[in-house]
Image (spheres, helix red, strand yellow):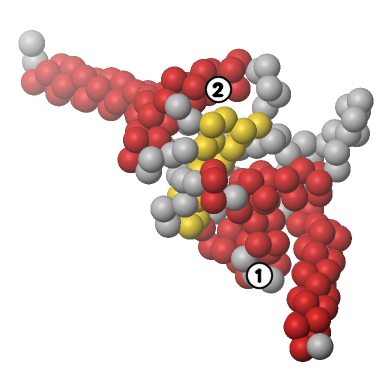
Amino acid sequence: MTTRRKFLRAGLGVGLTGLACHQIWRHGHDYVFAENFAEVVPGKIYRGAWQKEWPMRRIARDYKIKSILALAHPYDAAISVKERALAKELGIKWIHKPIIDQRNMEVPKTVYEILDETAAILNDPANYPIFFHCHHGLNRVSMAQIAYRTKYCGWTLEQATAEVASGFGLVTANHGPDYRTMVKYYEQNVLPYREARAVAARAAADSRTR
């Protein structure tokens, strides 16, 4: 065999090996590594994408997850059924609150009502440590995080949006709600809530001074 042919075969072997490694990484990555996993509140609240079984088991073990909050997919979708079964096996409470437009449902809720319920779940210490996710871990989880930060942590919309933008970027959805929805949520659900709490606090203070 000539030296040239040896080099060609060696080059071809290296190329095929590289291609195989790339495919293994591409298709096996999600089965091994947690996708878009991040800590929101240390020891309490974690966010991410829908995880394959191995990464989810590792997250549950390492962070002692007590609750999973799923923000995407129908209840009876295969992806939901599988995660629900895993949660049951691990003794984890599985909560399903898909952030979707429900106008075509028999008893619809607005996106803002769903965000309120989601924020309340994230604020409930009985659920800690909690892992919340949508499919890719970018859009709906960010909306839920902004809802939680603004309604229960006293953050402004700008502060909450900046936190998400710096960590994951702001994703624009072609169909359905995205971070832009949070402007109306803030005006409609957060600011009146704060004002009502302030009025109640002033009334309580006045009654104590009488």
Foreground residue among 55 and 64: 64
Q: Which residue is mark 1?
A: 154
User: Which of pointers 2 and 1 lies earlier in the amino acid sequence?
Assistant: 2
Under mark 1, the amino acid is Gly
Q: Is residue 192 left or right of residue 4?
A: right
Q: Residues within 10 Å of mark 1 (few under 14, many from 20)?
A: few
Residue in the picture at 59% in, 50% down: 124
Q: Position of residue 119 (x, y in %)?
A: 67, 51
Q: Residues within 10 Å of mark 2 (few under 14, many from 20)?
A: many
Foreground residue among 24 and 120: 120
Q: Is residue 197 above or below residue 2?
A: below
Quarter-of-image position of residue 95: top right
Residue in the picture at 83% in, 69% down: 196
Foreground residue among 170 and 124: 124
Structural distance between the alpha carbons of marks 2 and 1: 33 Å
Foreground residue among 65 and 146: 65
Q: Position of residue 63 (x, y in %)?
A: 37, 43
Quadrant assignment for the N terminus: top left
Residue 49 seen in render: no
Q: Is residue 134 left or right of residue 151?
A: left
Label 2: which secondary element = helix
Under mark 2, the amino acid is Arg
Q: Which residue is mark 2?
A: 84
Residue 207 seen in render: yes
Farthest bottom residue?
209
Residue in the picture at 86% in, 43% down: 110
Q: Position of residue 28 (x, y in %)?
A: 37, 24
Q: Position of residue 183 (x, y in %)?
A: 79, 61
Quadrant assignment for the C terminus: bottom right
Residue in the picture at 41% in, 53% down: 43
> Residue 201: which numbered mark, if any?
none
Q: Is residue 183 above or below residue 141?
A: below
